[in-house]
Image (cartoon, rainbow, N blue to C red):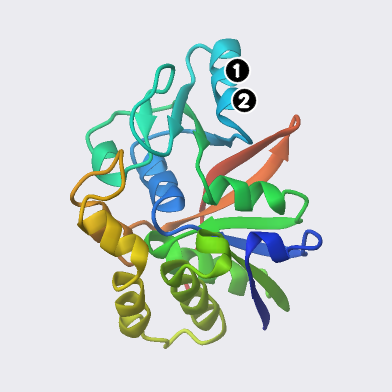
Amino acid sequence: MDTRFLGIAELAEAPPVAVVIDVMRAFTVAAWVFAQGAEKIVLAESLDEALGLKVRHPDWLALKDGPPAPGFDMVNSPGLLRSVDLDGRTVVQKTTAGTVGALAVKEAPLLLCAGFVVAEATARLLRTHKCDSVTFVVTGEDGQAEEDLACAQYIARRAAETGANAAGFLRRAGGSRAATELAEGVRQGAHPDDAALCLELDRFSFAMVATLEDSLMILRPYAVPSG
């Protein structure tokens, strides 16, 4: 499998297969949103669009980075989502890096969003599709975020070689700037457990697939057969 690891600014066009990585915290949060029962996530281009979608769909919930803000129901924190019942709900998500990265490759025929919590399911889906070429979008820090790059490289290794060990990749992610800032409480809208939750390997057994539906980018959980 031919793999490329690119930052958002390096994307010249949508590749045939894209895996968008945001470990801390957008796509860890997305996985928790589905685990708490949500039906789908709408990836919004801006905060205004997120709030506009809520106006048009009053039963939808909106989620953003940073501290709580008027009109938004939740913040981008897996630790704070663990006790929220989202059964059957639609969540609109807007974050600084993850949603931006996904929207940058929205024309990709196969578009996955991932973090460590869904790493194996994501790798298994790539194996199932027998993907010859995969572009991993490293969303954080202009493509330099160590936690995102480590996760991308681990998923790529697992997609090509099922015996790959995660320990070194998780160590790199745990020593990243994002993990340090979360652990030290630097980032707003966070829970003390966020860093640890973002580093949980294969917490969930589904992958997350994004598709364009009526001009909106919709993320859904995707059950991947084992094996």
Label 1 Cα crowd, 10 Å radius (few <14 / some 14-19 / many 20+): some
Work out whether 192 lies above or below 196.
above
- The residue lying toward the viewer, choosing from 175 and 27, is 175
Residue 224 in sight from this viewpoint: no
Is mark 1 in CB contact (under 8 Å) with mark 2? yes
Q: Is residue 53 left or right of residue 133?
A: left
x, y percent for residue 160: 57, 84
Q: Kindly identify the residue that appears in the image at 33 percent across and 37 percent down.
A: 36
Quadrant showing the N terminus:
bottom right
Work out whether 74 lies above or below 95.
above
Residue 169 occupies quadrant: bottom left
- The residue lying toward the viewer, choosing from 154 and 86, is 154
User: In the displayed image of the protein, which residue is found farthest to the right?
Assistant: 13
x, y percent for residue 190: 27, 43
Tag 1 residue: 52
* Helix, strand or loop for disc 2: helix
Q: Is residue 46 left or right of residue 186?
A: right
Looking at the rendered structure, the kind of residue marked 2 is Glu
* Helix, strand or loop for disc 1: helix
Looking at the rendered structure, the kind of residue marked 1 is Gly
Residue 112 occupies quadrant: bottom right
Residue 94 in sight from this viewpoint: yes
> Which circle marks residue 49 in the picture?
2
x, y percent for residue 185: 22, 50
> Which circle marks residue 159 in the picture?
none
Residue 3 occupies quadrant: bottom right
